[in-house]
Amino acid sequence: MNTADYARIERAILYLEKNHQEQPSLEDAARSVGLSEHHFQRLFRRWAGISPKRFVQFLTLEHAKELLRESRPVLDAAFEAGLSSPGRLHDLFVQCEAVTPGEFQRQGAGLTITYGFYATTFGECLLGATERGICGLLFVAEGGRKSALADLASRWAGARLVEDSRALSAVARQIFEPLANGPRRPLNLVVKGTNFQIKVWEALLRVPPGAVTSYGDLARRIGKPAASRAVGAAVGANPIAYLIPCHRVIRGLGVWGNYGGGAARKKAMLIWEAAQTNNGDRAGSAGLPSKSAAFEFARFEPPSYGTTRMP
């Protein structure tokens, strides 16, 4: 996977946003990333199967608002199935398992986390896993690898981290190159958080590729209509990017909003998914997390809010 392609895509997004009032031409945008207009066209075809013109249309506020409207019936169907049931709309199998407050408080003590850095459709990512499953997926942003690794380590402060890119290379390919890797086995995710965070992350699993929701709508769908701010905080605390699709949450007015891996990356991910959804001959061909995944959740409510354990 060519991370240089994504780097140019991100630079194009930043250029178009910065200069949107001048309405730059495609030639201007191509020049901003060091390409001819011809090679700029090829870049977007190669990355997402769409033209730069179509890409710019996806980038507009009007498109974001339209996407919110069009996503509602899809989300209604997904949530009517129930948060605890398998998400058959995009073939996810969700399994929630509680851990004791003591296991949460030990913060990974006694665990070994194997990690590696991998090229993806959306730039370089850090993938970490224990013997039980994937425990972290972060995109490398401005702070570089060192910052991404520090983030993973802080979430599992008691664990021992061991770099071994070869050990997880097949998992990385399964996530981001599913059709190039043959039949897919279930992916097991190990996530720890408060009961509220877990509820939000479970709800995110119901939002399929090509759809988006707002913070307010997500709060309403989990039965906490007045908690949109808290929902936003939980979305921001998601430790496994992409597989738990926090990038599919935007603001109610159609504003794309922030993202831990960078706002430009969030736009790129949503535009890429929209392109795959709208192009039937390409749908799912470059990494949509559309096969079975088993999710193992560690639940613990901090003592200040009372301790709740799942049965």
Image (tube, helix red, strand yellow):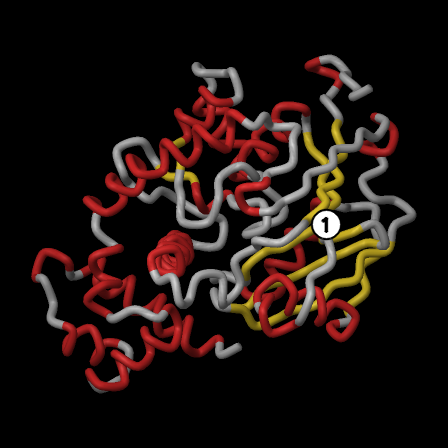
Q: Residue at x 50, y 16 (%)?
A: 224
Q: Is residue 118 above or below residue 191?
A: below
- Residue 212 falls left or right of residue 145: left
Q: Residue at x 53, y 77 (%)?
A: 1
Q: Nearer the viewer, residue 158 or 39?
A: 39
Q: Is residue 92 above or below residue 22?
A: above
Is label 1 in a helix, a strand or a loop? Answer: strand
The percent coordinates of residue 238 (x first, y second) are 59, 41
Q: Nearer the viewer, residue 184 or 56?
A: 184
Q: Nearer the viewer, residue 182 or 174?
A: 182
The percent coordinates of residue 86 (x first, y second) are 65, 36
- Residue 31 falls left or right of residue 154: left
Amino acid tagged 1 = Cys
The percent coordinates of residue 307 (x first, y second) are 77, 16
Q: Residue at x 42, y 71 (%)?
A: 6
Q: Quadrant of residue 125?
A: bottom right
Identify residue for label 1. 135
Q: Residue at x 36, y 32 (%)?
A: 72
Q: Residue lying farthest right? A: 110
Query: Could you tell me which quadrant the C terminus lies in?
Result: top right
